[in-house]
């Protein structure tokens, strides 16, 4: 068998106390996926067009103006709505950026950094890495670091692959030397540390359920309140558990999805609920990863720069 090893037990019934700052019962990580301009696009020289957006339809052999402009909405309009809400509630996020998206919209990277958000890497294009040849993947990772640093003025220390990574992705991230963590895991409510080539590497689990992607492809969310209710139910349950066993929760967002006027109220309801509840640490993912390293007594990781 090849690939990443599977641990089906995890922490079992005795998860560690993460000792979040301020004795928070729950750490909430907002992840804003920035993919606009990184989706497969014949107009950008790719081999085919992306087929998944508000509808599922692939245009073959020519530029797909409908798909292109659907993605464009995220940077032209959605971004500003999301940033206004985060500013209003004093919330920080991880901007999970495809590197090609930032080469086309460097202003976005610079604006997000000025607002205090983390810039992380979501690969070069918006594509899975499963079956990607190792040497090619190594070059993709190096290019991402170079292009994001050029656009944002900081290098990414976090990584998340769209869908499935390859069997080599995590090892190549550690080999590159500058990645503090990855989020290519969906199986826990707490970070954990793995050893890769003799080096400790932090994994911060991601989530597809508390995620605005469920507005698309019959995912179960139709109205802004559907998203809010689901996320708030998860927050409240984990907050209750946090009396004895604090956890971490990820809320996944996309510029072109939650940024629509019929959906953005769902994000506002979630932020207002967190603000009223108290005992919740809204944190960038690099902050969570650094906290976890200190908790486990691991050597301090270099600052991004």
Image: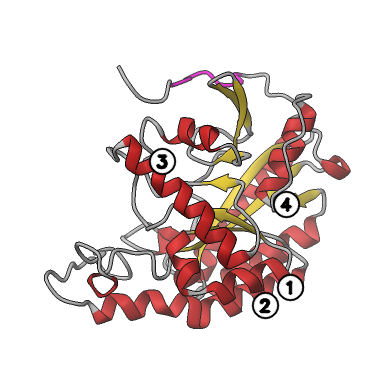
Please report whichever mark, 4 or 3, sits nearer to the chain's N-terminal start. Answer: 3
Residue indicated by mark 1: 87
Secondary structure category for the residue under label 1: helix
Residue indicated by mark 3: 138
**Magenta-colored span:** 6-12
Residue indicated by mark 4: 283
Relative to 214, does residue 76 appear above or below in the rendering? below
Please report whichever mark, 1 or 4, sits nearer to the chain's N-terminal start. Answer: 1
Residue 183 drawn at (x, y percent): 53, 41
Residue indicated by mark 2: 84
Please report whichever mark, 3 or 1, sits nearer to the chain's N-terminal start. Answer: 1
Q: Are marks 2 and 1 in contact (CB under 8 Å)?
A: yes
Residue 132 drawn at (x, y percent): 30, 40
Residue 262 seen in this snapshot: no
Secondary structure category for the residue under label 3: helix
Distance (Cα) linking label 4 and label 2: 18 Å
Q: Residue at x 35, y 77 (%)?
A: 70
């Amino acid at each position: 068998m090849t690939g990443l090893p599977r641990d089906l037990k995890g922490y079992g019934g005795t998860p560690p106390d993460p000792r979040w700052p301020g004795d928070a019962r729950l750490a909430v990580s907002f992840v804003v996926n920035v993919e606009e301009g990184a989706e497969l696009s014949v107009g950008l020289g790719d081999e085919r067009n992306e087929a998944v957006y508000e509808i599922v339809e692939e245009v073959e052999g020519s530029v797909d103006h409908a798909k292109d402009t659907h993605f464009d909405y995220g940077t032209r309009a959605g971004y500003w709505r999301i940033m206004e809400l985060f500013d209003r509630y004093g919330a920080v996020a991880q901007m999970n950026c495809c590197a090609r998206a930032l080469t086309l919209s460097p202003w976005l990277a610079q604006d997000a950094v000025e607002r205090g958000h983390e810039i992380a890497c979501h690969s070069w294009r918006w594509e899975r890495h499963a079956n990607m040849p190792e040497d090619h993947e190594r070059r993709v990772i190096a290019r991402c670091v170079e292009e994001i640093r050029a656009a944002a003025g900081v290098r990414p220390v976090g990584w998340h692959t769209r869908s499935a990574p390859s069997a080599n992705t995590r090892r190549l991230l550690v080999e590159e030397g500058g990645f503090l963590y990855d989020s290519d895991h969906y199986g826990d409510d707490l970070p954990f540390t793995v050893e890769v080539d003799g080096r400790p590497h932090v994994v911060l689990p991601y989530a597809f359920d508390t995620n605005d992607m469920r507005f698309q492809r019959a995912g179960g969310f139709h109205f802004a309140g559907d998203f809010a209710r689901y996320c708030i139910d998860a927050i409240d349950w984990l907050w209750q558990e946090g009396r004895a066993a604090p956890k971490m929760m990820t809320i996944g967002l996309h510029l072109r999805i939650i940024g629509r006027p019929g959906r953005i109220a769902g994000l506002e309801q979630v932020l207002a609920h967190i603000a009223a509840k108290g005992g919740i640490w809204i944190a960038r993912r690099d902050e969570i990863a650094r906290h976890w390293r200190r908790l486990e007594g691991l050597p301090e990781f270099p600052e991004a720069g």
